[in-house]
Amino acid sequence: MHDIEHIRKNSEEFEKAMKSREMKGFTAKEILEIDREKRSLTTQLQDLNRQRNEITEEIKKLKMSKSPCEKQVELSKNIANEIEAISLKEQAEKDKLMDILSNLPNIPAQDVPIGKDENSNVEIRKHGEKRQFDFAPKSHYELGEKLGLMDFGQAAKISGSRFAILKGQLARLGRALINFMLDTHINEFGYTEVHHPALVKDKAMYNVGQLPKFFDDSYLTTDELRLIPTSEVVLTNLVADEIIEEKELPIRFTAYSECFRREAGSAGRDTRGMIRQHQFGKVELVSIADEDQSNNELERMTNVAEEILKKLELPYRVMLLCSGDMGFAAQKTYDIEVWLPEQNKYREISSCSNCGAFQARRMSTKYSLEADKKIKKYVHTLNGSALAVGRTIIAIMENYQNSDGSITIPNMLQKYMSGDTVINK
């Protein structure tokens, strides 16, 4: 959510920022006109309420002195009717303003490159050597189906397209990855593990910016609960409507969850395999920080996600996303892209974002300063994948495949798989 006071003082800068986020069809001038009308109506209401209070006191005195007060009573009724009419107008302007502001994305940080799409993203660093194969590497779905451990046909019969069934050692590989990732985040980096619901109310989705903008991208149940698209929804909402002491920050949460997305805007993209699914597992990181910590916390969070790939010895690169390619609530985002040999390209496996105070304003979460507890500021929220489990399985299968179709299990995961070293048919 945006601070209307900031827009009032920086209207040209705000409009320029929204254009860099590819937002069209609105102007800051229109927002400020609605805001002025709302404030004018609010002033009128305050004046009318003051008049009504004065007349009410006058009526009391007249009744106590047994003097006529019919004119004052009539005037009080007229003012009450006027208050009711103006209140409806004021609420309509409030709703109009809230609707516009709720659908506008976060302002990019100053060091974010301006651009329309992924072509303007900037590579920050690379890590790891790409494996040189002496045979033509196969895709993860070719490998999985030949091993008899990945079944898309049966999944389609049961659930439809964009679902997968993993069996045997591949299913176990997924479980191993979850445990390995969570153990790393908890034991090495001090995150608090959370187990949470997969169904949430609309308010929780609104607080993190998933609603109203992405109304059609989530699954809505008949009793008005939504399946979460990411653990970020729940983990961030753990501090909703709270005032936190500055000394408690940063707060760091991690969780594994199944995630559910309609992928409504992805028709025709990655239709084969497990790259883009309606249901997928993900280990999430969320940090609640103060405004001075959040930039460093984003770097730390990105490094934590990178550490998983380093331990798995998977080559990757880190990209700074441009203004037009960032998520709705983000002010700065790093994507981590893992190398997939069969595709001969890097593909996103993690996205780590600093949302600044954008989500905190929506969910009314502040922190009190240690130096003066009367001063309250909005917290900064951050989130990142560490990592998407399905895409990590894909990366392991393609990077660790052997010429006979088997898959070598990374050293770091072998203890999670009872010492197995290879996935065979």
Image (spheres, rainbow, N blue to C red):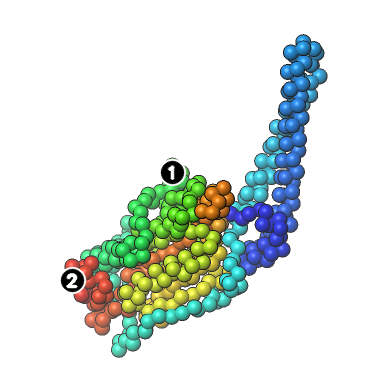
In x, y percent, where is residue 6?
67, 57
Residue 142 visible here: no
What residue is rendered at 66% in x and 53% in y? 4
Distance from Cα at disc 2 to Cα at disc 1: 45 Å
Question: Compared with residue 166, is residue 317 higher up or lower down, i.e. above or below?
Answer: below
Residue extending furthest toward the top: 66
In x, y percent, where is residue 207?
51, 51
Question: Compared with residue 403, is residue 50 higher up or lower down, i.e. above or below?
Answer: above
Looking at the rendered image, the disc whose residue lies closer to the viewer, 2 or 1, is 2
In x, y percent, where is residue 339?
39, 78
Q: Label 2 belongs to which residue?
A: 419
Residues 191 and 92: in front is 191
What residue is rendered at 26% in x and 83% in y? 403
In x, y percent, where is residue 110?
60, 69
Residue extending furthest toward the front: 371
Q: Label 1 belongs to which residue?
A: 222
What residue is rendered at 25% in x and 75% in y? 411
Figure quadrant of the C terminus: bottom left
Residues 372 and 317: in front is 372
